[in-house]
Image (spheres, rainbow, N blue to C red):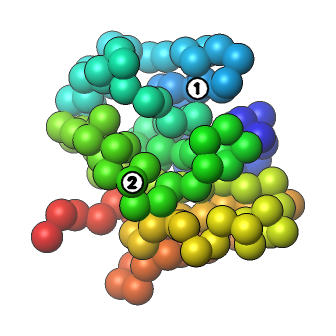
Amino acid sequence: MVKEIVEQFAPRFTPDGVLVYLGDTEEKHKHYEIEYLRSLGVEIDPHGRMPDVAIHYTEQNWLVIVEAVTSHGPVNALRHNQLRDLFDGSKAGLVFVTAFLNRSTMREYLPDIDWETEVWVADAPDHLIHFDGERFLGPYESS
């Protein structure tokens, strides 16, 4: 699933973005740009539960944080808060995305997906599902 995120999601929704983190269940820190994250104001707790993928979409100055359901589950309310805390201090706006292989898997987790997040499904790679009411893809500012 991480491969699909990097090869299909990233070019479509974060063109020319910088891959700053990539991990999976076998290798937690497969690709980890610690200094780049620091330049964005992010100091990661080494014991923090990292997402599967983080991409800096430089054109918009967004840090797009993607969870693959095959590894940890969706960005639910608990995970949303954990990721916000983990990336606290980011100078880039935070965008949270849950990635699924297909819609039938998504259906299983649909009640758990948190508001103010996005959903991407690999078998329909050109589309996003927005769990919000006020805007499309982009960071949400704290009120």
Residue at point 18%, 37% (across, down): 89
Residue at point 73%, 68% (across, down): 108
* Disc on the earlier residue, 1 or 2: 1
Q: Nearer the viewer, residue 59 or 24?
A: 24
Coordinates of residue 104 in the picture (x, y in percent): 84, 69
Residue receiving disc 1: 22
Residue 60's place in the image compared with 44, above or below, is below
Q: Secondary structure at mark 2?
A: helix
Residue 136 appears in the rendering: no
The number of numbered badges drawn on the structure is: 2
Q: Nearer the viewer, residue 122 or 59?
A: 122
Residue 105 appears in the rendering: yes
Residue at point 26%, 41% (across, down): 85
Q: The N terminus is located in which quarter? A: top right
Q: Image check: 109 left or right of 141?
A: right
Coordinates of residue 100 in the picture (x, y in percent): 73, 56
